[in-house]
Image (cartoon, rainbow, N blue to C red):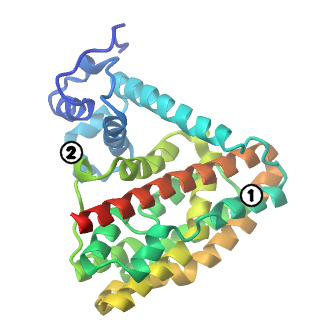
Amino acid sequence: MTPPVATAPQLRTLLSDAFADALQDDGLTALYGAQPADRRDRFLTLLAIYDLHTAPLEQLGETVRHQGHPVVADLKSRLETEWLTELDAAWEQAGRLAEADDPDRVVQAMRSVAAKDRLPAAYRWLAKDATWDELVEFLMLEGGPDGGFDDLVAVCQVGLSGSAKLELGKNYWDEMGNGNPDAVHTVLHQKMATAIGMGHPPREDMPVEALERAALGGLLATNRWLQPEMLGALGLLELQAGPRCRLVLQAFDRLGAPGAAYPFYVEHAEVDPVHGKDWMDKAVVPTVTERPEWGPRIVKGAWWRSTVNLAFFEALRVELLEARAA
């Protein structure tokens, strides 16, 4: 099926709302060429598209059959192209074009990206000043330092070989609790959420920075050509999560969190620094040794993730402080 050539339709609703309706009533053809109202609408639409690729089938129902629909592919391609243009423009403006392609300098560049704002103001504020309600809201939007990391690692290892594939497999197995169902990281996160009374905010209520942060994983996971950037983005999470989780634990101590809240963040505080080193030594180094042209792109993916993260953390900190002052 080839969609008809058409100009972008004028929607009476947000594109994200129209897309959700079209998935239910087989009305996708009417959205060919449609444009989002703004960046928030763009990311809400992209997240709904990424759901078709990665969300649990029981959550999607019959709508999953539209995953490969030509209009879905058209929307995905156009919205991602606009977003990637923005990400690349920011990368160029930051002067990151000349990153080296030898393994040692790639690792050095990755660590440099990770070290900059390793402990954002938002986490320092969380550890020292946030109230209990602010802590819960922060963690609700944070979603864990590496929300969905297990599935992302599984996708990222496709097509790799040797040391890199083994390291990502080892990392994934750790996410799976090394075979212990009670130690699976998503299970630990669910137990933490229950212990502190943490809900799950609807996307429509999330700041645009949170939507972009959530969508970045979908962008990387559903575009095979972005595998180098994905390797860098996931490696950055491993390099940064440990120190940030320790600040969350400080907040738990200060505010008297229940014992069941601790294991998820304790696990990441203790294990992620090891994961970060192994990701560099056993995944990035051998990959760049074999494919030097991937080096700058791996660093770029790390930088993308860092930039999106920092924008989210600062927006959330400011939002919570403004709510306190109101």
Q: Real-space Cα distance between discs 2 and 1?
A: 43 Å
- Does residue 228 appear left or right of residue 135 in this picture? right
Residues 260 and 290: in front is: 260
Report whether residue 6 is seen. yes
> How many numbered marks appear?
2
- Does residue 299 appear left or right of residue 46 in this picture? right
Q: Which mark is residue 109?
A: 1
x then y, percent, for residue 281? 75, 68
Q: Assess disc 1: are there few (<14), some (14-19) or many (≥20) residues with their C-alpha within 10 Å of its C-alpha.
A: many
Residue at image coords 49%, 57% = 309
x then y, percent, for residue 24? 16, 33
Q: Label 1 amino acid?
A: Ala
x then y, percent, for residue 210? 37, 53
Q: Assess disc 2: are there few (<14), some (14-19) or many (≥20) residues with their C-alpha within 10 Å of its C-alpha.
A: few
> For the residue labelled by badge 1, is the local secondary structure a helix, a strand or a loop?
helix
> For the residue labelled by badge 2, is the local secondary structure a helix, a strand or a loop?
helix
Q: Quadrant of the C terminus?
A: bottom left
Residues 120 and 73: in front is: 120
- Does residue 109 appear left or right of residue 177 in this picture? right
Residues 122 and 228: in front is: 122
| Image quadrant where residue 166 sits | bottom right
Question: What residue would you read off at disc 2?
Answer: 61
Residue at image coords 69%, 51% = 299
- Identify the mark nearer the N-term, 2 or 1: 2
| Image quadrant where residue 84 sits | top right
| Image quadrant where residue 52 sits | top left
x then y, percent, for residue 143? 36, 65
Number of the front mark, 2 or 1:
1
Q: Label 2 amino acid?
A: Gly
In the image, residue 48 sits, relative to residue 260, either above or below, namely above
Report whether residue 180 is seen. no
